[in-house]
Image: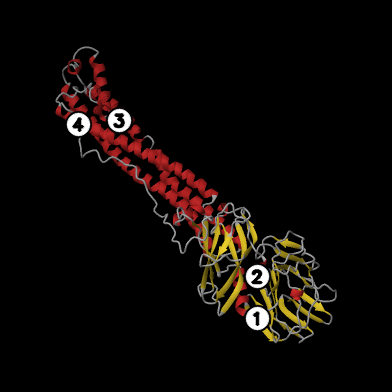
């Protein structure tokens, strides 16, 4: 008799399903690549529209602060000191002057000042940041970042205790330094004042003021405790003076000589909070700004001033008291800056700034920097470890699905072949040695159960005389076949524990990676103080990738487990039916007769 596996019954072969994530869409190039030596670029948007800083009027030229974080910049692909950074205008051709205040590849944070020549209120402007040339030399130009009307700019980025250096071309470097530095001020480092320390600004032709000359002072200030009449900026020249300070945390400006006046803001600044303060004089009016908004203005004109100035305390005793608190980004200008520029400074430099946003990196070839590529770049080490573990679980579960589904389908086909022969043959003992001649039947678990029953009958026949099955003998045969059946079920279920672990543990392991990733993302935001969707979204997206990986392990494992269990139940049911059928036939056949003769 020709034996063939029955087609159509036994189920479909389980194929390994490969899931391909088609999210790596190449980015669209807005314009031609600036220079091919640079591998990466990032779009930086200076947004003065209602969606951003919502600035009215024309701001004009201004130094814009660009903050970089791990969420929007790939520090590992840039040189450790940022020497390969280049800023290019929106035409992708014109280089822009810039300088780096801080660049820390370990903490993955940087603060960079970029000269934007034409910021317009109500409009958004895009520039490009290029990096990734390992042979690039630094070209940062600090002085050119500021227009000639800036007479002094102190970042306080020098080492602690050192006198701050002027960032403008006038080199109005201080003679003395502050009491110390705050490593995490509003912008990089900031100066600490203890009431005694004073930053002395030397006399400089760029800072000289004629009577009635225009002038602007601006700075970020943080006062821990209200103090009476303390100096932020002071300059005395004989009987004339310009004093800017705090009185119980109420900002004020006082002019002695010229047109004497004292103007105080209507309310105090918040204790322990960074506040942007600016004072402008145009020869007729003194205007005080707090956080970019006009706090108060009044008539007044500056006297002639050509002497040294000071920050934090008056140089000569007997004047205003010493300031206790912190200052950052102090600027002096030889013109009365516009209200739009002062507002832009406050909104672009402060916490939660909406004026400057940094998009995701693009690679020159466009490969690997689509949506999925950007997410992968932002993965934290913890997330990588979790995803690696999930990858191992996925490989193990897929291997189990393949091997177990192949095995159960092979057994089902062999069972079908053996059952056809068993049904067609009137002698239930005629197939004892059929497995040695037909490879398909040798794989049948029902055939192995059949052999467990026939082996017992053979042992009984070898005792001599005809084989007669009593009811007790039939139950012994049944028990032996059921024992073999249990072992076959165990063989079918062997390895499925891997799938149950993948189903139940995969999503939880992925969730663990996501929670840790979200925690780290918000921790970075807390350190930088920059609440920006462009900095938050990539980190959150990367964190969620761990959960996606966990589900990617669990879902195929669930489908495979259910399929294998269904096939195992079918095979187990067929085994149970065969045991009953075989015992019934043997009991009827061997009420009388010899097993030895039937087995020959």
Say which label, 4 or 3, has the lower sequence index: 4
Q: Secondary structure at mark 4?
A: loop
Whole-percent x, y for residue 317 in the image: 85, 74
**181 versus 583 height, above or below:** below
**404 versus 225 height, above or below:** above
Residues tagged 3 and 2 counted as in contact (Cβ below 8 A)? no
At x 21%, y 27%, the residue is: 583
What residue does disc 2 label? 146
Crowd class of label 2 (few under 14; some 14 to 19; many from 20; radius 10 Å)? many
Whole-percent x, y for residue 295 in the image: 65, 81
- CA–CA distance in space, label 3 to label 1: 89 Å
What residue does disc 4 label? 4
- CA–CA distance in space, label 2 to label 1: 26 Å
- CA–CA distance in space, label 3 to label 2: 87 Å
Task: Please give the label number shown on residue 485.
Answer: 3
Task: Please give the label number shown on residue 295.
Answer: 1
Residues tagged 4 and 1 counted as in contact (Cβ below 8 A)? no
Q: Nearer the viewer, residue 183 or 147?
A: 147
Q: Secondary structure at mark 3?
A: helix
Horizontal side of residue 80 vs 217, given as left or right: left
Q: Secondary structure at mark 2?
A: loop
Q: Nearer the viewer, residue 91 or 551?
A: 91
Crowd class of label 3 (few under 14; some 14 to 19; many from 20; radius 10 Å)? many
Horizontal side of residue 214 vs 560, given as left or right: right
Say which label, 3 or 1, has the lower sequence index: 1
């Amino acid at each position: 008799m020709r034996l063939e596996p029955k087609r159509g019954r036994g189920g479909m072969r389980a194929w390994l399903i490969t899931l391909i994530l088609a999210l790596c869409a190449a980015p669209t190039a807005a314009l031609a690549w600036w220079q091919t030596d640079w591998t990466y670029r990032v779009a930086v948007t200076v947004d003065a529209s209602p969606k951003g800083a919502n600035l009215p009027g024309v701001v004009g030229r201004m130094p814009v602060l660009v903050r970089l974080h791990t969420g929007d910049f790939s520090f590992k692909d840039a040189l450790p000191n940022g020497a390969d950074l280049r800023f290019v205008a929106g035409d992708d051709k014109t280089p822009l002057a810039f300088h780096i205040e801080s660049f820390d590849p370990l903490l993955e944070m940087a603060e960079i000042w970029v000269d934007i020549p034409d910021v317009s209120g109500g409009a958004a402007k895009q520039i490009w940041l290029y990096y990734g040339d390992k042979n690039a030399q630094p070209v940062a130009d600090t002085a050119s970042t500021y227009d000639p009307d800036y007479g002094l700019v102190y970042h306080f980025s020098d080492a602690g205790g050192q006198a701050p250096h002027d960032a403008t071309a006038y080199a109005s470097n201080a003679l003395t330094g502050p009491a110390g530095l705050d490593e995490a001020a509003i912008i990089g480092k900031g100066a600490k004042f203890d009431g005694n320390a004073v930053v002395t600004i030397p006399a400089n032709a760029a800072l000289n003021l004629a009577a009635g000359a225009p002038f602007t002072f601006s700075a970020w200030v943080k006062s821990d405790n209200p103090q009476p009449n303390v100096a932020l900026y002071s300059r005395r020249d004989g009987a004339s003076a310009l004093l800017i300070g705090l009185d119980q945390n109420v900002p004020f400006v006082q002019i002695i000589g010229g047109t004497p006046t004292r103007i105080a803001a209507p309310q105090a600044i918040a204790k322990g909070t960074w506040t942007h303060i600016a004072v402008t004089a145009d020869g007729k009016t003194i205007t005080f700004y707090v956080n970019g908004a006009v706090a108060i203005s009044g008539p007044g004109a500056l006297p002639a001033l050509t002497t040294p100035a000071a920050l934090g305390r008056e140089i000569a005793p007997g004047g205003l008291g010493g300031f206790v608190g912190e200052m950052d980004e102090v600027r002096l200008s030889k013109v009365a800056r516009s209200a739009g520029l002062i507002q832009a400074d406050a909104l672009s430099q402060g916490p939660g700034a909406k004026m400057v946003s940094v998009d995701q990196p693009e690679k020159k070839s466009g490969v690997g920097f689509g949506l999925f590529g950007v997410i992968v770049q932002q993965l934290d080490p913890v997330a990588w470890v979790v995803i690696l573990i999930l990858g191992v679980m996925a490989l193990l579960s897929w291997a189990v699905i393949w091997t177990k589904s192949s095995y159960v389908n092979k057994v089902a086909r062999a069972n079908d072949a053996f059952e056809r022969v068993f049904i067609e043959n009137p002698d239930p003992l005629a197939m004892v040695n059929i497995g040695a001649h037909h490879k398909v039947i040798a794989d049948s678990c029902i055939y192995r159960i059949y052999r467990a029953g026939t082996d017992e009958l053979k042992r009984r026949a070898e005792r001599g005389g005809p084989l007669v099955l009593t009811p007790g003998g039939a139950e012994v045969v049944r028990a032996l076949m059921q024992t073999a059946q249990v072992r076959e079920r165990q063989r079918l279920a062997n390895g499925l524990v891997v799938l149950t672990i993948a189903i139940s543990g995969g999503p939880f392991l992925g969730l663990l990676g996501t929670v840790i990733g979200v925690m780290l993302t918000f921790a970075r935001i807390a350190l930088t103080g920059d609440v920006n969707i462009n900095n938050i979204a990539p980190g959150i997206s990367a964190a969620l990738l761990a959960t996606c990986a966990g589900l990617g392990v669990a879902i195929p494992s669930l489908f495979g487990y259910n399929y294998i269990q269904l096939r195992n139940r079918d095979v187990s049911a067929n085994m149970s039916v065969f045991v009953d059928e075989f015992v019934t036939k043997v009991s009827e056949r061997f009420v009388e007769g010899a097993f030895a003769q039937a087995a020959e």
